[in-house]
């Protein structure tokens, strides 16, 4: 659900259930800023995975792979701010195919 948007930015509220994660993605035309509002998040940012807690945030430059996961026992609530020249969903590409936890090339 978009909380606000323009032709150069979009703000979303994202909820992730405990133990769940979003798919590994890569955006070539937009950067993102993720802010943890409630819960804990394992944030993949490029080649690093860092644990974030409430009130912490991560900037993900365009072209870096990214993933948001909830390792905690309560729902994760995250604010995502996208900025860039192309904000359409079709600019998202799957960085790696994940099957049963294994990376396939």
Image: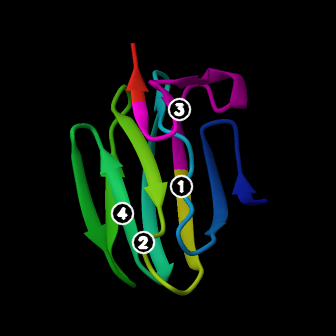
> Callout 1: few (<14), some (14-19), or many (20+) C-alpha neighbours within 10 Å?
many
Looking at the image, do the residues carrying marks 3 and 2 touch, with CB atoms under 8 Å apart? Answer: no
Looking at the image, do the residues carrying marks 1 and 3 touch, with CB atoms under 8 Å apart? Answer: no
Which residue shows up at 33% across the image and 38% down it? 61
- Residue located beneath label 1 in the image: 81
Q: For the residue labelled by badge 1, is the local secondary structure a helix, a strand or a loop?
A: strand
Q: CA distance from mark 3 to mark 2?
A: 19 Å
Q: Earlier in the sequence, mark 4 or mark 2?
A: 4
Q: For the residue labelled by badge 4, is the local secondary structure a helix, a strand or a loop?
A: strand
Which residue shows up at 38% across the image and 31% down it? 62
User: Residue 101: which quarter of the image?
Assistant: top left
* Label of residue 30 in the image: none
Which is closer to the viewer, label 4 or label 2? Answer: 2
- Asked whether residue 85 is drawn in magenta, I would say yes
- Residue located beneath label 4 in the image: 42
Q: Quadrant of the C terminus?
A: top left
């Amino acid at each position: 659900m978009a909380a606000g948007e323009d032709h150069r930015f979009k703000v979303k509220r994202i909820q992730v259930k405990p133990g769940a994660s979003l798919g590994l993605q890569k955006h070539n035309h937009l950067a993102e800023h993720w802010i943890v509002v409630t819960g804990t998040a394992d944030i993949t940012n490029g080649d690093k995975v860092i644990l974030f807690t409430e009130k912490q945030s991560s900037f993900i430059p365009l072209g870096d792979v990214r993933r948001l996961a909830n390792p905690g026992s309560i729902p994760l609530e995250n604010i995502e701010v996208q900025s860039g020249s192309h904000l359409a969903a079709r600019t998202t590409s799957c960085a790696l195919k994940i099957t049963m936890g294994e990376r396939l090339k």
